[in-house]
Image (cartoon, rainbow, N blue to C red):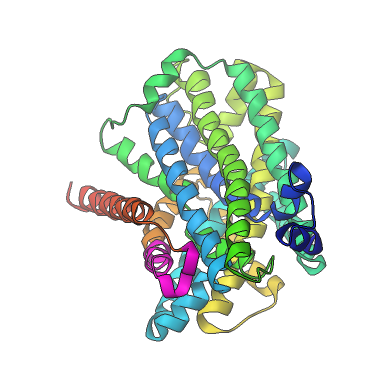
Amino acid sequence: MNAQAVAVLQGRGPRRGLARLTPFLGPAFIASVAYMDPGNFATNIQGGAQFGYLLLWVILGASLMAMLIQHLSATLGIASGRNLPELIRERWPRAAWPYWVQAELVAMATDLAEFLGAALAFQLLLGIPLIWGAVITAISTFALLTLQKRGFRPMEFAIAAFVGVIAAAYLVQLVRSHPGLEALGGFVPRFEGQSSVYLAVGIIGATVMPHVIYLHSALTQHRIPAANDDQKRQVARMSRTDLLLAMGLAALINMSMLAAAAATFHAAGRTDVGDLTRAYQTLTPLLGGGAAVAFGLALLASGLSSSAVGTMAGQVVMQGLIRRSIPVWIRRSVTMLPAFAVILAGLDPTKTLILSQVILSFGIPFALIPLLIFTARRELMGPLTASRPVQVFGWMFAALIIGLNVYLIVRQFFG
């Protein structure tokens, strides 16, 4: 596949059509999984059930900014040949260890959501205790991670298959739930009290994921060798197409989650259905057993795939920031411990999922700010330096995230 990409860059391959594009597809689909993980299920379903279509605008805005951020991350890898953690260590060596600590904490919050989501899906689909769902999840993710040994392409195909399952499942949900034209009102920016702000921060935390900001630059840095500036521009253009396809699909799935929850639960007066288990159980009497099974399969595909991607991101962060690496099975074992602790303590999985997404939103500026700084430096990026409008929008988004977090802290602790 690399040889085919090089042939396209050198003008020896197909000049148009899917055959020209195919060798460049993949990295954005791996990154996109993090944008439809179980944390998205928890926040989107609770948002739809509790507030109807109110927060659709939050998902749309966060998804558009996520596209911009992942584009910058992918371009950074293409232009510099280094990933974001490596550049943080190179440019700010004293910050490397503190950065690694906060990134690992965020990674554990990420993995908590992903692991719990898959375990819950096994419980719902198979009717087994949650702890056994967690055990099956651990085995399944270990098996999925073995694909890394065969190169990047098998993992990309596997992740794309999981994305297909999620998309098909939510197509079933939309067809069954019939959202009305009133959904368009959800794209008008507004809030309804502190609870909606809390959920909005959770949605942003679930939609814009810090660990894939780090990961995407690593997925593109050595994937396709570009010999000169013109070839780098070609790779960047193909990367944008990859990104629009993958992230566009992720945005549609996220909006479908909230819209289906609004049309099914909120419209029926079931504003209390924010719990994933209750949502699964309530779908059968409202929409039929097929909708419930589709929901469970989507949650399972989401949890397994995003858990594997989270582990990949953790490896990239550790290697880049502190130049250390540990076997994948050790990382996988350590990062799933909080999920087992939550299950054994009897804590509510859905509430834990939503809390983890709020924690994730606090990690976004740590990844986003250096990304914006580095992609604006011409000596690093060359012809792929971020334009002034892109820089302005990026900084506006960083300011928005920080502002929402400060607001949430003040309201939580001071009323």
| Residue 195: quarter of image | top left
From the top left corner, tell me how far across and down residue 239 is, in percent: 61, 53
Q: Position of 85 compared to 188: left or right?
A: right
| Residue 272: quarter of image | top left
Is residue 147 or residue 24 the one in the foreground? 24
Residue shown at 60%/63% (left/top)? Answer: 230
Magenta residues span 366-384
| Residue 47: quarter of image | top left
From the top left corner, tell me how far across and down residue 405 is, in percent: 29, 53
| Vertical placement of residue 327 versus 413, above or below | below
**Residue 370 lies within the magenta run:** yes
Q: Position of 310 compared to 10: left or right?
A: left
**Residue 173 lies within the magenta run:** no
Q: Residue furthest left?
A: 414
Q: Is residue 131 visible?
A: no
Is residue 208 or residue 17 the one in the foreground? 17
What is the chief secondary structure element of the magenta stretch?
helix
| Vertical placement of residue 355 versus 265, above or below | below
| Vertical placement of residue 264 versus 35, above or below | above
Residue shown at 40%/28% (left/top)? Answer: 50
From the top left corner, tell me how far across and down residue 175 is, in percent: 63, 18
Q: Position of 415 compared to 181: left or right?
A: left
Residue shown at 28%/31% (left/top)? Answer: 190
Is residue 191 or residue 27 the one in the foreground? 27
From the top left corner, tell me how far across and down residue 46 is, in percent: 45, 34
